[in-house]
Image: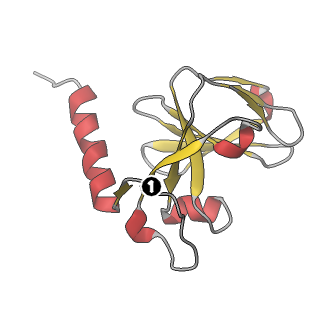
Amino acid sequence: MEGQCLCGAVTVNAPDSQHIGACHCGICRRWGGGGPMLAVHCGTDVTVSGMEQVKTFASSDWAERAFCSQCGTHLYYRLLPTGEYFVPAGLFEGATLEIESQIYIDKKPDYYDLANDTPMLTEAQVLAEFEATQAETTPVNR
């Protein structure tokens, strides 16, 4: 899949996927103007062209968010420990996509609801999953 920012200065290439995750955490909602972040989990095999226009922000100890410095388009959320990219679904114009999961469902405000019938994880469940993944991938010092 290929997507680009509004001004075309940055292009994102990622493996084909049809699955969107919706994140309702406060940071994603603030970043996206009040609604959930709807992102395609693209894994680690992502290429970004126009990196001289990309600005990043460390939104937590484990992740960064990127945007185009020319037009402000949100480009990706990247997990630092694994290098996995989550790319806003809107970058991939014309792609056939479907929401497959929702996270931080307990942080979702009352002013919107998604009609999709998906698995839903709370903040505690997401953090427990993340910690379990970290324990599996972190080498043990002996």
Horizontal side, residue 81 vs residue 67: left or right: left
Residue 30 vs 138, above or below: the answer is below
Of residues 33 and 64, which is closer to you in this image? Answer: 33
Characterize the local packing of mark 1: few (<14), some (14-19) or many (20 or more) Cα atoms within 10 angstroms. Answer: many
Horizontal side, residue 95 vs residue 121: left or right: right
Residue type highlighted by circle 1: Gln
Reading the image, the residue beneath label 1 is 102
- The extreme bottom residue here reads 110
- The extreme left residue here reads 142
The image shows residue 74 at horizontal and vertical percentages of 70, 46
Horizontal side, residue 120 vs residue 142: left or right: right
Quadrant (top left/top right/bottom left/bottom right) for the N terminus:
top right
The image shows residue 24 at horizontal and vertical percentages of 50, 62
Residue 89 vs 113, above or below: the answer is above
The image shows residue 62 at horizontal and vertical percentages of 42, 43
Residue at 51 percent of width and 66 percent of height: 26
Q: Which image quarter: residue 111?
A: bottom right
Residue at 46 percent of width and 35 percent of height: 80
Quadrant (top left/top right/bottom left/bottom right) for the C terminus:
top left
Q: Which image quarter: residue 67?
A: top right
